[in-house]
Image (spheres, helix red, strand yellow):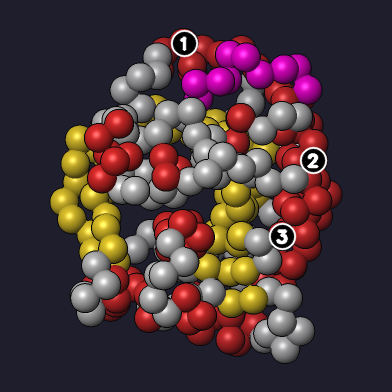
Amino acid sequence: MDKKTLDFHLCDHCNLNCYYCDHVSPWCKERTHTLKEFENNLILAKKLENIFSVIHLTGGEPLLVKHIWIYLIKVREIYPDKQIVLYTNGILLPKMTDEFWFTLKHYNIRLHISIYPVLDKKSTMELITEKGVFAYAKEIKKMLDIEWDFTAKNGHEAYSKCFRCPFVYDGKLYPCPRLCLAINKDKNFPDIENSYLDLKDINLSEERILNFLENPTVACDYCVTHKEKNWRITNENDFMENN
């Protein structure tokens, strides 16, 4: 973990539903985190302030959040010196209000746009230029096929391939969003108690946090990464297979 990042969800659901979504958004219940819930997570994460340098605001699709600029301002108020990056699939960018664009510029918040095949890259980047905000754009035509296998013992291999995106959700620190959201979807997921740190624990030390983030958890055993697959939208048959 060279340039450490920390991820927060603004919402769990999405308007695109990519089949290989590593935040399992197609199978998440629709949930927008209230401003108070979001602020509580940000404050609890102050325990990690010396560990990370970049905040990722993700989902789901964050632009689905009503009055999202209020959330963005809150992040900057609590973390005045961190780099803040807002992730989006870009579909809703043409509909965003002046308040949104002003907040990005005034509070120095960057955009990361995932350019999926359904998005018009040219018009999207023209809009970004017009608004004068800083943005990254990454074209996505393939995604990793990842699944859970509760008979596997794959921890160190999974960890060696992992992008390592520490994730704060409902006051807990997880090694990645996929594990967190899988646990929240499936209450029978094994080794749940060993899969996160409770940030409300007053005895939680920086040393323990670093050890947690720099080593595979028990749940990493079950993470099996397959080859890249062509990007596609989740369809009705996929929902039937996963329910």
Ranked by sequence position, the earlier of labels 2 and 3 is 3
- Judged from this view, the residue extending furthest toward the left is 227
Query: Hey, which quadrant is residue 157 in on the image?
Result: bottom left
The residue that disc 1 covers is 123
The residue positioned 40% from the left and 70% from the top of the image is 189
Q: Which mark is residue 200?
A: none
Ranked by sequence position, the earlier of labels 3 and 1 is 3
Q: What residue type is disc 1 on?
A: Ser
Q: Nearer the viewer, residue 26 or 172?
A: 26
Q: Vertical placement of 62 versus 98: above or below?
A: below
Query: Is the residue marked by circle 3 packed among few (<14), some (14-19), or many (20+) residues within 10 Å?
Result: many
The residue that disc 3 covers is 41
Q: Which mark is residue 73?
A: 2
79 relative position to 215: left or right: right
220 relative position to 101: left or right: left
Q: Nearer the viewer, residue 233 or 109?
A: 233
- Judged from this view, the residue extending furthest toward the right is 77
Q: What residue type is disc 3 on?
A: Asn
Q: Disc 3 versus disc 1: distance between alpha carbons?
A: 35 Å
The residue positioned 32% from the left and 39% from the top of the image is 239
The residue positioned 66% from the left and 19% from the top of the image is 96
Give the magenta part as a residue range. Answer: 90-99
Q: Disc 2 versus disc 3: distance between alpha carbons?
A: 15 Å
Tally of numbered discs: 3
Q: Disc 2 versus disc 1: distance between alpha carbons?
A: 27 Å
